[in-house]
Image (cartoon, rainbow, N blue to C red):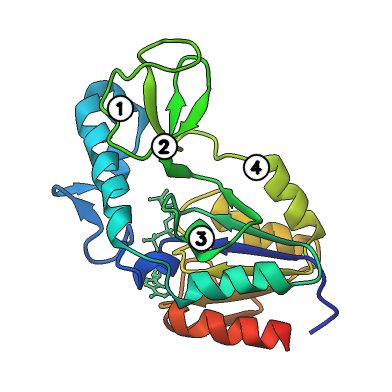
Amino acid sequence: MAAIRNVVILTGAGVSAESGVATFRGPGGLWEGQRVEDVCTPQALARDPALVHRFYDERRAKLASVAPNPAHLALARLDAEWPGELLLVTQNVDDLHERGGSMRLIHMHGELKSALCAGCGHREAWEESLPPGCECTVCGAPLLRPDIVFFGEMPYRMEAIERALAEADLFVSIGTSGAVYPAAGFVQTARYHGADTLEMNLDPSQGSGWFAESRLGPAGVLVPEWVEEMLA
Ligand code: APR
């Protein structure tokens, strides 16, 4: 492998699966009999705010009963010990990467433990349930909503992510089906800029063909092995 200095890592629901957090498109990808995609939309929020808020309240409450798995811990070790640039971009809204110790981290689809004011854009840490109508502590409007990027909304920090992909020597995708853009296109951007590419996933993803190397298996096994290789 050519000299690697700048690393960009993308994670999806598969990295949290072994912690007991359900993935979206695998078995159990339904919620109250609905496709998740039908719940995480601005239209659903406008049509039935109580249902959408309840969906995220249940997922936020579940965080207390799950813990980082060896994949999260290995990624945090790499973050701490890697001498070059490193950015972990996660599609996940759980807090397992933080709790595992990752620091250089971007949540491109938002976070369960954050509330966003649909009025003024202020966001604040939120641990409890968030019913519709909670007032923003900055502008006072009763417009706090889950700080989650819904389908059709722009993911967060895309400029920083694109910059990191342009500078990457290695792009690694872990535990994502490659079904949702723009994350699914990151491998193409990285390749365009000359990065080496590696995928680790339980099953071949929709983007497997774009990766120079694809390792199949559970993240809890593959990621610690890969981090050992990187730090050797
Ligand atoms: N180890 C590694 N990979 C796993 C594991 C595991 N233990 N278990 C499942 N996987 C893989 C599956 O094979 C699948 O390819 O993780 C992937 C999970 O895919 P999805 O459920 O589609 O989740 P994700 O790719 O993160 O979804 C992307 O879609 O619903 C939206 O915004 C939501 O961020 C989410 C986005």
| Disc 3 to disc 4, C-alpha distance | 19 Å
Look at mark 3 in the image and give the residue it sits on. Answer: 97
Instruction: Place residue 13 in its image quadrant.
Output: bottom left
Which residue lies most toward the top here? 140
Q: Are the residues tagged 1 and 2 within 8 Å (C-beta)? A: yes
What kind of element bears circle 4?
helix
- Rendered residue at 45%/44% (across/down): 111
Q: Is residue 207 above or below residue 43?
A: below
Residue 51 at least partly seen: yes
Circle 4: residue type? Met
What kind of element bears circle 3?
helix
What kind of element bears circle 1?
helix
Instruction: Place residue 158 in its image quadrant.
Output: top right
- Rendered residue at 45%/17% (across/down): 137
Look at mark 2 in the image and give the residue it sits on. Answer: 150
| Disc 4 to disc 1, C-alpha distance | 24 Å
Q: Which part of the image, by quadrant, shows the N terminus?
A: bottom right
- Rendered residue at 41%/78% (across/down): 202
Look at mark 1 in the image and give the residue it sits on. Answer: 45
Circle 1: residue type? Leu
Circle 3: residue type? His
**Which callout, 4 or 2, points at the residue further toward the start of the chain?**
2
Look at mark 4 in the image and give the residue it sits on. Answer: 158
| Disc 1 to disc 2, C-alpha distance | 9 Å
**Which callout, 4 or 1, points at the residue further toward the start of the chain?**
1
Along the line of sight, the residue nearer the viewer: 61 or 200: 61
| Disc 1 to disc 3, C-alpha distance | 27 Å
Where is residue 122? Give x, y as percent: 53, 23
What kind of element bears circle 2?
loop
Rate crowding at label 3 as few (under 14), some (14 to 19) or many (20 or more) other CA atoms within 10 Å.
many
Circle 2: residue type? Phe
